Amino acid sequence: MRVGRARGRLGRAVRRKRRVASAGLAVVAAALAVGGTDAQASRGTAPPEVKPAPAAVRLVSAPVRIADAATVRLLRPGDRVDVVAAERAGPPRVVASGARVAEVPAPEKGLGDGGALVVLSVPRDTARALVGAGAVARLAVTLC
């Protein structure tokens, strides 16, 4: 009786199964590689249309006077803020959402309760809306 012989048979069986499995995987991979383009054509549908990347939005610097100077002192360049216009007649409304703080100028001397200035980097249309809202309402910011 030979004891070592069973180990040899087991090793050969495992190697044989590995070869069969790897050959099967190679056949499947080749079929998928070839069938990928032919399968699309046989369905009669056109390949999906690739959409161009959206055009980059040009940002402008918009100086905005915020009613609460203490809030502006909390801001740093790079912060993201929402600008809210609070009118006496109506409910508050968001004028700019996710605007990037570009600069926080030093506070001006002698302007009691005039608020504080902050420069925001926003699209041109949003800058127009900020200027219009600042003329008729008090503006506030919330950090995003």
Image (cartoon, helix red, strand yellow):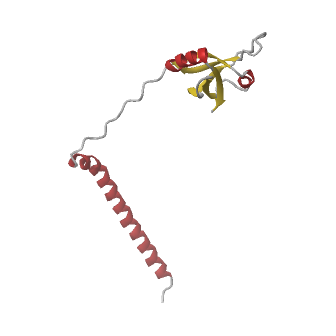
Q: Quadrant of residue 54?
A: top left
| Residue at image coords 31%, 50% | 33
Q: Which of 9 and 133 is in front in this view?
A: 133
| Vertical relation: 39 (above or below) 62 | below
| Residue 7 rendering spot, x and y as whole percentages | 49, 78
Residue 62: in sight, yes or no?
no
Q: Which of 71 and 24 is in front in this view?
A: 71
| Residue 109 rendering spot, x and y as whole percentages | 78, 10
Residue 9 lies left or right of residue 83; in this view the side is left
Outermost residue, top side: 110
Residue 3 lies left or right of residue 79; in this view the side is left
Residue 17: in sight, yes or no?
yes
Q: Quadrant of residue 91?
A: top right
| Residue at image coords 38%, 62% | 22
Quadrant (top left/top right/bottom left/bottom right) for the C terminus: top right
| Residue at image coords 34%, 57% | 26
| Vertical relation: 3 (above or below) 88 | below
| Residue 36 rendering spot, x and y as whole percentages | 29, 49
Q: Nearer the viewer, residue 24 or 129?
A: 129
Report the number of numbered marks: 0
Residue 11 lies left or right of residue 32; in this view the side is right
Outermost residue, front side: 89
Q: In which quarter of the image is residue 93?
A: top right
| Residue 59 rendering spot, x and y as whole percentages | 53, 19
Residue 64 lies left or right of residue 32; in this view the side is right
